[in-house]
Image (cartoon, rainbow, N blue to C red):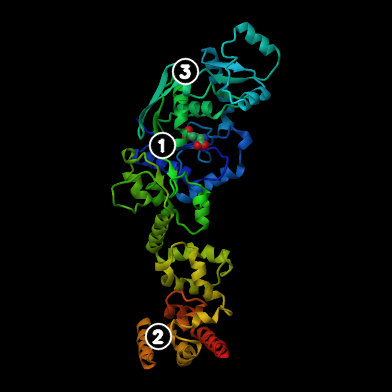
């Protein structure tokens, strides 16, 4: 069997991390089996259609490197891949179901249906068994009708799910006679989804657990149409650390929001692969290429999978450290530009400063966005930082001034020496002043960067330039003295 899998989102909103986990698993299964990954847009619910959602979908999958083999933009033998472009096609299947007695036309008005809902009643199936004459009478009234599926009133329907095992539903528990075709002539999700999965020769349905309750209805539809149902493989729920379905309450959920926050696509892919799937108990790091070789359905778990933001941060840091200096430069540049620290395009001087600073911050970055905060002092003079930050613990302003007065004249030359030379000189200086190295360097760090936390001090001064560093140190000393 040649595997054909699909990701068929409804463009009703922006791509959610849970949806993209589904896309990833489908993509990987296609790659591992030499199969085909189909992208299909299920947009038959025009009331909820969101054009931005479609763009967001393409951008998200492209950013993550999840190329679809067939679908919008790339085409394929089973197109079109946007359901509204296929709308003429569903009618014949609805007709076939009407003819074979598996479906019926219903003429309820919106008000009547609403009244049933308000009264907490199930749909009363009143058009289910009309005689041909009664049916003709209703048609003659010119009332718009929908096509409803005749769910069997007894018996049960089951699936054998790859992840959840054998599950069976009493047919009477399946929603009462769901609508297959709306009065506007468009199919509902159920009909369009089943017809398309069949016509597109989809072999495996891998999707979120929220679709599990729809599975028996789909199986009944396949049977009614005389088709073989595909293999079902429902994925585990993605939850936050409180065990509740992952939502905005837990943090970012929209995939491109992670991009904005400075996550690398490699990290998102790596992390998402582990949300409900594992290779073994210990391996944490997987590239997309690794996953394309080793992914397997039998290692998908059915227990809810926790989305752990801290773990994702750790993995993101890992991928940031793996990048070459040039690659990291390219990745952080847009963030520095968006923050207005660097021009677009960057001047050669700015480029040199940032390239030189990359090795200083690479080890410390968890997110690409952290670079803007860590490198800000190279572009913006932190003129009015809080002076008290300069004063080391256990020292007061006067003692700090005493030490700092000795240090300020030494600053300009730092830029011309190696770290080792600077280290040695300042250690000796601290010993002479009978104080700790930290008490010597901390006030300088604050004077230069405006903060107690900065990239390594000597390297930072080298990037800033000896002149500028000396100017900042002298000014800070003056300001501190004025407080005495
Ligand atoms: N259009 C459905 C969605 O929005 C597809 C569900 C399925 O995979 O069958 O997720």
Q: How many marks?
A: 3
Query: Where is residue 26 drawn, in percent x and y?
Result: 41, 39
Q: In this figure, which residue is indicated by the disc labeled 1? A: 36
Judge depth for marks 3 and 2 and give the one in front: 3
Residue 113 in the image, given as x and y percentages of width and height: 63, 24
Mark 3 or 2, nearer chain start: 3
* Nearer the observer, 233 or 441: 441
Label 3 crowd (10 A; few <14 / some 14-19 / many >=20): some
* 304 shown above or below 362: above
State the residue position of label 2. Answer: 417
- Camera-side residue of 401 and 226: 401
Q: Residues within 10 Å of mark 1 (few under 14, many from 20)?
A: many
x and y percent of residue 311 in the render?
Answer: 39, 55
At x 60%, y 7%, the residue is: 132
Per the image, label 1 sits on a secondary structure element best described as strand
* Residue 59 in picture, x, y percent from top left: 53, 48
| In-image side of 225 versus 288 (left or right) | right
Which residue: 50% across, 55% down?
A: 259
Of residues 243 and 280, the one drawn nearer to the viewer in this rendering: 243
Q: Secondary structure at mark 2?
A: loop
Q: Quadrant of residue 222?
A: top left
Q: Residues within 10 Å of mark 2 (few under 14, many from 20)?
A: few
């Amino acid at each position: 069997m040649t595997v054909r899998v699909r990701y068929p989102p409804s463009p009703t909103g922006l791509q959610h991390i849970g949806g993209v986990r589904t896309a990833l698993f489908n993509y990987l299964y296609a790659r591992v089996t030499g199969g085909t990954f189909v992208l299909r847009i299920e947009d038959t619910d025009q009331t909820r259609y969101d054009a931005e959602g479609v763009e967001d979908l393409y951008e998200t999958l492209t950013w993550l490197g999840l190329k679809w083999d067939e679908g919008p933009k790339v085409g394929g033998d089973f197109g079109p891949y946007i359901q509204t472009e296929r709308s003429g096609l569903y009618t014949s299947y609805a007709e076939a179901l009407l003819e074979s007695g598996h479906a019926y036309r219903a003429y309820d008005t919106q008000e009547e249906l609403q009244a049933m809902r308000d009264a907490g009643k199930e749909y009363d199936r009143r058009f289910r068994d009309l005689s041909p004459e009664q049916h003709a009478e209703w048609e003659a009234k010119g009332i718009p009708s929908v096509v409803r599926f005749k769910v069997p009133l007894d018996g049960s329907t089951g699936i054998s799910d790859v992840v959840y095992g054998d599950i069976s539903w009493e047919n009477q528990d399946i929603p009462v006679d769901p609508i297959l075709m709306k009065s506007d002539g468009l199919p509902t999700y159920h009909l369009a989804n089943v017809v398309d999965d069949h016509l597109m020769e989809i072999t495996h349905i891998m999707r979120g657990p929220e679709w599990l309750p729809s599975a028996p209805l789909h199986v009944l539809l396949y049977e009614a149409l005389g088709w073989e149902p595909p293999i079902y493989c429902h994925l585990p729920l993605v939850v936050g650390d409180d065990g509740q379905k992952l939502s905005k309450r837990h943090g970012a959920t929209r995939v491109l929001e992670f991009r904005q926050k400075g996550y690398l696509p490699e990290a998102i892919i790596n992390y998402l692969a582990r949300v409900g799937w594992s290779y073994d108990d210990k391996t944490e790091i997987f590239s997309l290429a690794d996953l394309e070789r080793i992914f397997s359905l039998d290692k998908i778990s059915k227990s809810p999978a926790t989305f752990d933001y801290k773990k994702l941060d750790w993995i993101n840091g890992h991928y940031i450290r793996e990048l070459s200096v040039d690659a990291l430069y390219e990745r952080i540049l847009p963030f520095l530009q968006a923050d207005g620290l660097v021009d677009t395009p960057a001047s050669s001087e700015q480029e040199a400063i940032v390239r030189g600073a990359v090795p200083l911050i690479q080890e410390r970055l968890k997110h690409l966005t952290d670079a803007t905060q860590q490198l800000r002092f190279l572009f913006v003079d932190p003129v009015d930082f809080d002076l008290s930050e300069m004063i080391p613990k256990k020292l007061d302003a006067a003692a700090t001034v005493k030490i700092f007065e000795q240090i300020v004249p030494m600053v300009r030359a730092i830029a011309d020496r190696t770290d080792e030379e600077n280290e040695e000189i300042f250690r000796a200086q601290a010993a002479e002043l009978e104080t700790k190295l930290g008490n010597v360097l901390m006030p300088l760090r604050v004077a230069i960067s405006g903060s107690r936390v900065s990239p390594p001090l000597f390297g930072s001064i080298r990037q800033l330039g000896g002149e500028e560093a000396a100017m900042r140190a002298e000014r800070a000393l003056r300001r501190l003295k004025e407080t005495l």
